[in-house]
Image (cartoon, rainbow, N blue to C red):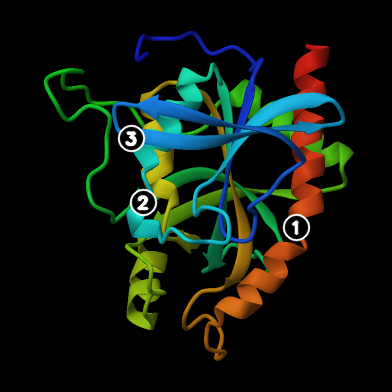
């Protein structure tokens, strides 16, 4: 399961969605996958007769807070199902970078403030130190970029996201410190997932949907209801993006 793989363009797509994105495409089946880290229910869906798997990391109806998500089980389950390309979608707060709410941003690096999470922390798998000089896969990103262009989605580049420990939002002081460290987005989940997908060597394209301005960037207080309202409007563009990737893969 953890063997070294040569990166090739995916033949089975997996998608992990975040806040506000709980259902994608036409649901065909719900598959229970047992992993060493726990059991996971993975949705098998179709878009225009093309199948893919997806997991809503917060559960249907947002029942799992960020600090209780079983990230290792989710990623291991997709690997076990034969997924060799994953698109992760995270909702994020905007710190800088010229982004605005509703923007799709390619994540190119991350800063993790979270508790340690890894597949390589016991004797069963051994100890391994994974290189993170690149956190996404060039060929796979190309497929996503082509799909975004075809669907008239402007995929903005340069996303550097910092992950804090939720479920509370960040303070003004924290956001200011994160900005000084070089991040232009902030969230509560991405560093966990980006670490694991890269460790397990699946082709990867992490995307942020800029959902709101982070604390202190504007004078407005953060309201979760406003974030959810915005994210409801991105379901169709996300489905278009996924369908385009599936088409691109099949053409290859």
Which is closer to the viewer, label 3 or label 2? 3
> Disc 3 or 2, which lies upstream in sequence?
3
* Alpha carbons under labels 1 and 2: distance apart: 26 Å
Quadrant (top left, top right, bottom left, bottom right) of the C terminus:
top right
Q: Is residue 168 visible?
A: yes
Numbered disc 3: secondary structure: strand
**Disc sitting over residue 234 in the figure:** 1
Residue neighbourhood size for the residue with mark 3, other residues' Cα within 10 Å, grouped as few (<14), some (14–19), many (≥20): few
> Disc 1 or 2, which lies upstream in sequence?
2
Numbered disc 2: secondary structure: strand
Residue 145 x/y as whole percent: 73, 35
Tell me if label 3 and label 2 are in contact, CB under 8 Å. Answer: no
Residue 190 x/y as whole percent: 44, 49
- Residue at mark 2: 111
Residue neighbourhood size for the residue with mark 1, other residues' Cα within 10 Å, grouped as few (<14), some (14–19), many (≥20): some
Q: Is residue 18 left or right of residue 197?
A: right
Residue 167 x/y as whole percent: 38, 68
Q: Is residue 19 left or right of residue 52?
A: left
- Residue at mark 3: 38
Which is closer to the viewer, label 1 or label 3? 3
Numbered disc 1: secondary structure: loop
Q: Is residue 231 above or below residue 155?
A: below
The single residue placed furthest to the left in the displayed view is: 123
Q: Is residue 231 above or below residue 138?
A: below
The single residue placed furthest to the bottom in the displayed view is: 219
Q: Is residue 57 above or below residue 228?
A: above
Taking depth in this image into account, of 226 and 215 the one nearest to the observer is: 226
* Alpha carbons under labels 3 and 2: distance apart: 27 Å
């Amino acid at each position: 399961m953890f063997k070294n793989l040569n990166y090739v363009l995916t033949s089975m797509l997996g998608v992990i969605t975040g806040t506000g994105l709980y259902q994608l495409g036409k649901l065909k089946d719900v598959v229970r996958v047992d992993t060493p880290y726990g059991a996971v229910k993975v949705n098998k869906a179709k878009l225009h007769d093309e199948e893919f798997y997806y997991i809503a990391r917060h559960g249907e109806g947002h029942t799992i807070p960020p600090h209780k998500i079983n990230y290792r089980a989710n990623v291991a389950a997709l690997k076990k199902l034969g997924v060799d390309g994953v698109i992760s979608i995270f909702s994020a707060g905007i710190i800088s970078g010229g982004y605005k709410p509703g923007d799709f941003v390619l994540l190119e690096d991350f800063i993790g403030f979270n508790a340690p999470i890894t597949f390589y922390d016991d004797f069963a798998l051994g100890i391994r130190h994974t290189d993170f000089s690149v956190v996404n896969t060039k060929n796979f990103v190309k497929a996503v970029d082509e799909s975004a262009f075809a669907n008239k989605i402007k995929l903005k580049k340069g996303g550097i996201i910092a992950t804090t420990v939720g479920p509370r939002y960040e303070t003004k002081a924290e956001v200011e410190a994160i900005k000084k460290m070089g991040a232009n987005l902030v969230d509560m989940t991405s560093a966990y997932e980006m670490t694991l997908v890269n460790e397990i060597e699946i082709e990867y394209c992490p995307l942020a949907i800029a959902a709101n301005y982070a604390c202190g960037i504007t004078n407005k207080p953060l309201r979760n209801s406003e974030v959810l309202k915005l994210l409801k409007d991105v379901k169709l563009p996300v489905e278009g993006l996924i369908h385009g990737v599936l088409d691109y893969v099949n053409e290859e």
